[in-house]
Image: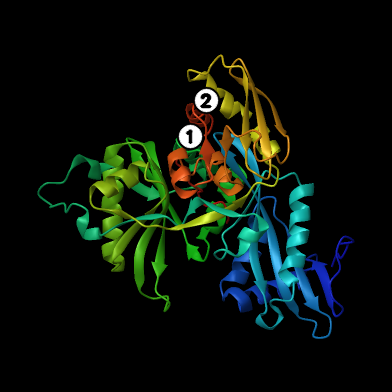
Amino acid sequence: MGTDVPWSELPDGFEFGIVETDEELDELVRFNNEIHGPEAGGMLRRLVNHLPDFNRQMNYFIRDVESGKTISAISAIPSVWSYGGIPLRNLELGFVGTRESYRTRGMFAFLYRFFEHQLETGYYDIATIQGIPYFYRKYGYEFILPLGRFITILPSAIPHISTEDVPPYMGIRVRPASSADISALMGLFSEMQSRLLITSARDVRLWQAQELTRMHEDRLVETFVLERNDVIDGYFRINEAKDSDAESVQSIRVSESSIKSYDSVMRTLQFLKSRATDSNASAIEIAGDTTSNLGKIAMDYGGLVNRGWKYQVKIPNVVSFIQKICPVLDKRLKASMFSELTRDVFINTYNNCYQISIEKGNVKHIADIGMQPVDAYTNIRIPPQAFLHLLLGDASIEELHDRQMDFLIRPGEKTLLEILFPKMASYISYYHV
């Protein structure tokens, strides 16, 4: 149990620990089962055992010395995401919990200070959490990237096929994926990601780990491949969402898909219809953004998009983040009327003012020149939370202006700002095991 946190002290009677031993991991698993439900501890253990770059030492806890019990804990879960193809190092705040009788006593605040220390010293580009509403805003997080978004379609809405008139696409083979398919699946995954702005990355280690565990949170996952004339034309992953009794199936969920051709999309829909009928499921839910081929055709047949939830995102160092995505900004400028532009752009977020220096269509320098007087650098003024939405492509200038009256742009600035930071679809595919 490591305890070196010289920058902060706990009240008497409590001790801080970093999970190091089997016994400490077992205790943390039991704690999560008690706080979050019977599946949480097993998921945490699976991540420790199988998720690349995550280990037991990235789990932190506070123990009541008198009782010897863990009373609060968090996990710092690393992953790699992507902004327009630029890798982003993400540190996710996960498995956050405090026993009810110890809440409102500063336990989480202590653990979060340690998490933020790891965030800063580890040079992470972003921090994320899938947590409860509102609470994390005071730590600088903002609801931005889509999470838990589905297109729901009734099995009966998918065309019925009679035995007398079987379409040719039913000859496309649907089979379980094998380890030999991973290279082809990675190519299809990259094609899917290429039309999105922010995505999760998945290297061969993560692919192998996911196909080994075959789990999506607490649900068993199956990966299927579509073959046309012995050539892979797509893949999809499914799991079953069950009622609390764990017996009856509510829906068949497609957690991920990348399918090239219309015929393979239709073959997939027929497969899902059959699977839903066999399971007596009342719905089919297709995860992902609405630009996917499967999602588009599902909506053609009456599929409806739910509101979903969102990842809460924090950028610990905005200057470093913009510097990292400069190749994407340069590409946008070069593809526009601003390909030879030379000028400074100042984005005033009231607390900070970011200088973006452009020379002949390339971003050459980024700086934070600090908080400015009320009458200085007024060409582009945008509240800091709204700037995160703009920076991450979550909303257009018009949408943000409608939401925030203090998002102010002087004439002559809007088009350039739109080129630099356009609204684009993002989707975070499953990046755990």
Question: Is residue 100 in view?
Answer: yes
Q: As rendered, which of 187 and 406 lies closer to the eye? A: 406
Q: Quadrant of the N terminus?
A: bottom right
Residue 350: which numbered mark, if any? none
* Placement of 181 over or under 133, stated as above or below: above
Question: Extreme front residue here?
Answer: 375
Mark 1 near mark 2, Cβ–Cβ under 8 Å? yes
Which residue position holds label 2? 332
- Horizontal arrangement in the rendering, residue 329 relative to residue 352 (left or right): left
Dot 1 or dot 2, earlier in sequence = 2
Identify the residue at image location x=28%, y=38%: 262
Q: Amino acid at mark 2?
A: Arg
Q: As rendered, which of 152 and 227 lies closer to the eye? A: 152
Callout 1: few (<14), some (14-19), or many (20+) C-alpha neighbours within 10 Å? many
Identify the residue at image location x=59%, y=51%: 313
Identify the residue at image location x=24%, y=46%: 300
Question: Is residue 203 in view?
Answer: no
Residue 253 is situated, as x and y percent measured from the top left of the image, at 39, 59
Q: Spatial distance from mark 1 to mark 2, Cα to Cα? A: 9 Å
Which residue position holds label 1? 422
Identify the residue at image location x=18%, y=51%: 159
Residue 197 is situated, as x and y percent measured from the top left of the image, at 50, 38
Query: Tag 1, which secondary structure?
Result: loop
Q: Amino acid at mark 1?
A: Pro
Callout 2: few (<14), some (14-19), or many (20+) C-alpha neighbours within 10 Å? many
